[in-house]
């Protein structure tokens, strides 16, 4: 049996002042257009607040959503790592949220020099209408600390430990805003190139492993709302940073938003920024 999964990770960025050129009201329809143009089976969003998520839900009637605020259940004002999914194609078997801290079950908890609470939201899905029935997979959606490398490393370790505890035959996709590049200590750990507290991660990166990669010139996913139209100084900085990397097929990007995967049954076919 061969099945096709389409997954998108999308940092919404919380709403800004109404007079800001990048306020949610000015870009919300573009966000919906991008999402509907790809029609992902799974949409992992980061940094969205309830008003943004409600708008997406209104515009995407074929989807349901799963996730809570990083402050805890019932909060409507702070960031979520929400997973949207096509309700006609998949159903949620189980799911939850844990905090990237020394107290992962405590809502709003912070550790390791983090500047704000960070979470990983996960859900196990089962495909509908396939034969034989029962094909399932897990999605893990995260948004890591923006400023503390230690918080990112330890958060990555905590999330990987969750993934490593799952049945080995359960495919996993680990998506989100990692706020660092893959040649950082966080990326190197998750991709099995360095140790963190004595263990080595075993995730793979969908981007270099995909049979087809689109928009390869967009080597960064953080763009400050400028897309690929960076200023001259910013462009020179980008080239300098790129030259400082150990360039090979595995590292030719400065993406801070990733889709990693685990499971021999998963084969990335196409990837696009």
Image (tube, rainbow, N blue to C red):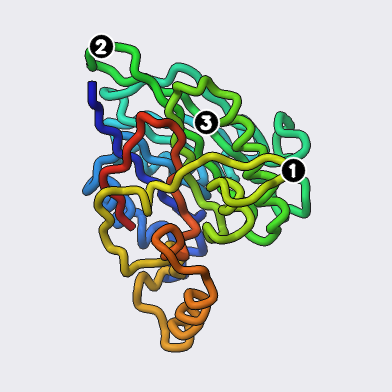
Q: Earlier in the sequence, mark 3 or mark 1?
A: 3
Residue wearing tag 2: 132
Badge 3 density bin: few <14, some 14–19, many ≥20, Cα 10 Å:
many
Q: Marks 2 and 3: in contact by CB < 8 Å?
A: no
- Do the residues bearing badges 1 and 2 touch, measured as CB atoms within 8 Å? no
What is the CA distance from the residue labelled 3 to the residue labelled 2?
A: 25 Å
Asked if residue 241 is positioned above or below residue 219 in the image, the reply reads below
**Which residue is drawn at the image coordinates 50% and 39% (left, top)?**
141
Viewer-closest of 116 and 236: 236
The correct choice, above or below, for 92 with respect to 184 in the image is: above
Say which residue label 3 marks.
122
Nearer the N terminus, badge 1 or badge 2? Answer: 2
User: Which mark lies nearer to you, 3 or 1?
Assistant: 1
Mark 1: secondary structure: loop
Residue 209 image point, x, y percent: 35, 48
Spatial CA distance of label 1 from label 2 is 41 Å
The local crowd at label 2, few if under 14, some if 14 to 19, many if 20 or more residues have their Cα within 10 Å, is: few
Q: Mark 1 — residue?
A: 197
Residue drawn at (71%, 29%) of the image: 105
Quarter the C terminus occupies: bottom left
* Mark 3 vs 1: CB contact within 8 A: no
> For the N terminus, which image quadrant?
top left
3 vs 2, front mark? 2
Q: Secondary structure at mark 3?
A: strand
Image position, residue 50 (x, y; %) = 50, 41
Q: Is residue 5 left or right of residue 184?
A: left
Mark count: 3
Q: Position of residue 41 (x, y in %)?
A: 30, 34
Out of 231 and 164, give the one closest to the viewer. 164
Q: CA distance from mark 3 to mark 1?
A: 23 Å
Residue at horizontal 57 percent and vertical 59 percent from the top: 180
Using the image, determine if residue 189 lies above or below residue 67: below
């Amino acid at each position: 049996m061969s099945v096709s999964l389409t997954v998108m990770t999308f940092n919404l960025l919380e709403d800004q002042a109404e007079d800001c050129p990048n306020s949610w009201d000015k870009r919300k329809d573009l966000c919906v257009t991008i999402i509907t143009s790809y029609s992902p089976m799974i949409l992992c969003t980061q940094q969205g607040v309830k008003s943004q998520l409600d708008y997406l839900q209104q515009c995407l009637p074929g989807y349901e959503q799963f996730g809570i605020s990083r402050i805890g259940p019932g909060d409507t004002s702070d960031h979520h790592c929400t997973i949207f999914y096509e309700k006609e194609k998949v159903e949620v078997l189980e799911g939850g949220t844990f905090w990237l801290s020394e107290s992962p079950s405590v809502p709003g908890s912070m550790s390791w020099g983090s500047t704000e609470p960070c979470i990983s939201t996960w859900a196990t899905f089962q495909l509908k209408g396939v034969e034989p029935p029962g094909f399932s997979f897990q999605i893990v959606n995260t948004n890591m600390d923006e400023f503390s490398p230690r918080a990112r490393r330890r958060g990555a370790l905590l999330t990987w430990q969750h993934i490593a505890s799952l049945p080995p035959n359960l495919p996993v996709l680990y998506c989100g805003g990692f706020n660092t590049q893959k040649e950082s200590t966080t990326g190197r750990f998750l991709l099995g190139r360095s140790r963190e507290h004595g263990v080595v991660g075993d995730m793979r990166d969908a981007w270099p492993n995909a049979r087809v990669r689109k928009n390869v010139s967009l080597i960064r996913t953080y763009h400050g709302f400028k897309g690929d139209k960076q200023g001259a100084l910013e462009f020179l900085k980008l080239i300098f940073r790129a030259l400082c990397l150990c360039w090979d097929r595995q590292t030719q990007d400065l993406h801070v938003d990733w889709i990693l995967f685990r499971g021999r049954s998963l084969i990335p076919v196409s990837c696009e920024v």
